[in-house]
Amino acid sequence: MPEGTLCNKTPVDTVEQLQALLADKSGKQYYEEMTQLDVDAPALWATIQKTFKSRMRTWLEICSHCGMCADSCFFYLANDRDPTQVPSYKIQATLGEIVHRKGRVDNAFMRDVMDTAWSKCTCCNRCGLYCPFGIDTGVMFSYLRGLCFSQGFVPWEMKIGSGMHRIYRAQMDVTSEDWVETCSWMCEEAEEEWPGLEFPVDKPDADIIYTVNAREVKHYPEDLADAAVLFHIAGENWTVPSKGWEETSLAMFAGDWAGCKQQVEEVYAAMDRLKPKRMVVTECGHAYRATVIEGPYWAGLKSGKTPIESFHYVEWVAEALRTGKLKIDPAKKIKEPVTYQDSCNYIRNGGLRECAREIMSYIAEDFREMKPCGEHNFCCGGGGGLNGIGRYRPQRNVGLKVKRDQILATGAKLVVTPCHNCWDAIRDLEEHFKIGIRWSFLKPLLLKMVIVPEHLRPEE
Amino acid sequence: MYAFLTGPMAWIAFTIFFVGLIWRGIWYVRGLDWRLDRVTYGQNVKYGIRGAVRSIARWLIPYGTHSWRYYSGYTALVFIFHIGLLVVPIFLLAHNLLLAERWGVRLPALSDAMADTLTVAAIVAAVLILLRRIALPEVRIITRFYDILLLLIAVTPLWTGFLAYHQVGPYQFWLIAHILAGEILLMAIPLTKLSHFLLFFLSRAQLGMDFGIKRGGMKSKGMEW
Ligand code: SF4
Ligand code: SF4
Ligand code: SF4
């Protein structure tokens, strides 16, 4: 059986396909079918010839096998320095082999490649900072995921995630109606406490268009209310789009480049339609990476930039604190030791280290850096989609050790985690290792300490 | 033999070296693709240049990056080895005399003591690099025979030259071995992954532009390598 009914080379584009996949509990049948899936070697090789150009070819060729990337990878450290976890080894044994064999690899090999690409690399790009030749193995792994996806060798949850984006333009089955409804429901709820609070949908020419992560809509709607209240307190003229509100991209984690393009184009269309001055995205790392950093390239925008200037939530918060739009009550600053999880996606790969430091200087009295930190911080352990893949839960949990030790070394019991994936990973880390820490997004912390201007205070 | 190696063979070696490197450079740059690489090479040029320069400069400075500092011992070996390989052949008095005789060009020359020190240090570094390769499991697992062969190709001109210059053993033999080894190295540079002689700069510039233009360079002071 070359192509399975669930596991095959066709991306999920219909609700029926999606439902069939979801009905297959934890992908049991899916992974069984995968053991029979044929590799289309000519197609694989054709794709490589078209897309594998001098940058990556050079990376594979000139790697001097010096091993300086070894200690940079948290998987290598967390697995007791297992040599098979050295970035150079991982990529040479997978992508390197595929290229070397001109795509003529078999099913078992491709399943191994899939396991490596998703369970031994989170595409955190830290190794790229440690290689003297600037070989960014994370970039190559992301490319490799694309090859796997095109051949149907992709973890079950990733196939579903990519399908969600293709069908709903969101990482979960949240429709535009669900979204708008949730907004107005959250607005009603919060209005009781915040008279005059608005949750403007599709308002043209606003200063800020706010975009989110579908999880917030589906599982954490309070986060939407918190965002609205903070914009309200800061006096921002903001809106959300009814369509193009989702910034995340499981399609990116899946290596589904066509799906990625569809997803970001929906967001860019909202920018074009509503003509806001700038875009702010919620506290999510990979959402920012997908829509702001990589997205313009998927969409073929020659400037390499989003149609309007785009900001991560930490940039907005830092600016609001700096300009006094948000004022912190000094008595309510965080007194206990607190640390900050630098997300690979908007810190290492987004240049926002200083924003995070600036925010902490306003809200915390005893801020403690992890070591290493900033651009050099280790991945939380759950990035690149790994948090969501059941098949690799054990590997993920081992990987969390590095973050656990980093946090313990700071002595802080509170971890600020303005990234959905990091937030999940650190929650799971606590569940798994029970080290007695708490973790939080910025919004709830800010709401506890911000000074509410006189005219916005609820009448007693 | 001597006449052949210093005549036609030298021409061949230098031609392969230069033409090969030029070809490598053109091939690399032509294979860059803003859409596939997801870096706008032709736009935001100012940020691109800043990123590229930063990415190269930091890595050329001993202990200039986190990585160089982290692997402090190995970093010392790498720099000593490369300084020996690059500085000695260009500024050696004996080479300079040859150059003056043939082309009438003179470069400043190293003192004998300095040249000896650099050479011996580089040879020792090469031996230690080899031992590290074998001793450390994380390096051993990625080591191929090819890697050891290239190290040998790179270091052979040094020790043969040293033996010839100090007339240890048969001078003629070592001299010829030295010239041959030098020519093999020159040809190996563009033809093997020793092409990092050039590609180090291009690849570093590329990643520097990636970070400088796309991955945060426009929102920060630049990557802290
Ligand atoms: S640090 Fe770079 S050159 Fe060295 S082994 Fe790793 S990828 Fe290869
Ligand atoms: S990108 Fe991150 S996880 Fe992947 S190999 Fe490099 S350091 Fe390891
Ligand atoms: S989840 Fe956070 S730390 Fe982990 S890879 Fe993503 S951004 Fe990085």
Image: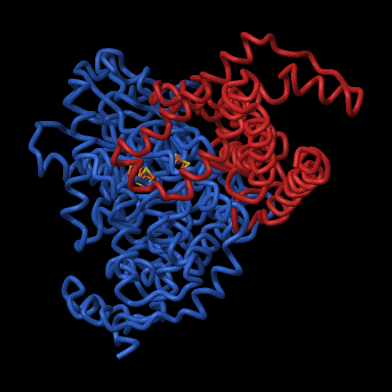
Q: In this view, does B76 lie to the left or right of B141?
A: right
Q: In this view, does B86 lie above or below A257?
A: above
Q: Where is residue B199 in the image (x, y as percent from the top left)?
A: 63, 43
Q: Position of residue B173 (x, y in %)?
A: 64, 34
Give the color of chain B as drawn: red
> Is A47 drawn above or below residue A236 in the view shown?
below
Label count reads: 0
Front in this rendered view, residue B163 or B220: B163
For image coordinates 37% across by 50% down, the residue present is A89
Q: Residue drawn 30% across and 28% down? A: A340
Task: Identify which residue, A13 or A186, lies in the foreground.
Answer: A13
Give the percent coordinates (x, y) of residue B171. 65, 26
Q: Position of residue B214 (x, y in %)?
A: 58, 43
Quarter containing the N terminus of chain A: bottom left
- Is A63 drawn above or below residue A31 in the view shown? above
Colour in which the image shows chain A:
blue
- What residue is at 58 percent from the left and 47 percent from the top? B193
Q: In the image, is residue A215 above or below residue A369?
A: below
Q: Looking at the image, which is closer to me, A254 or B218?
A: A254
B177 or A113: nearer the viewer:
B177
Q: Which residue is drawn at 34% across and 39% down?
A: B134
Find residue A317 and report its image quarter: top left
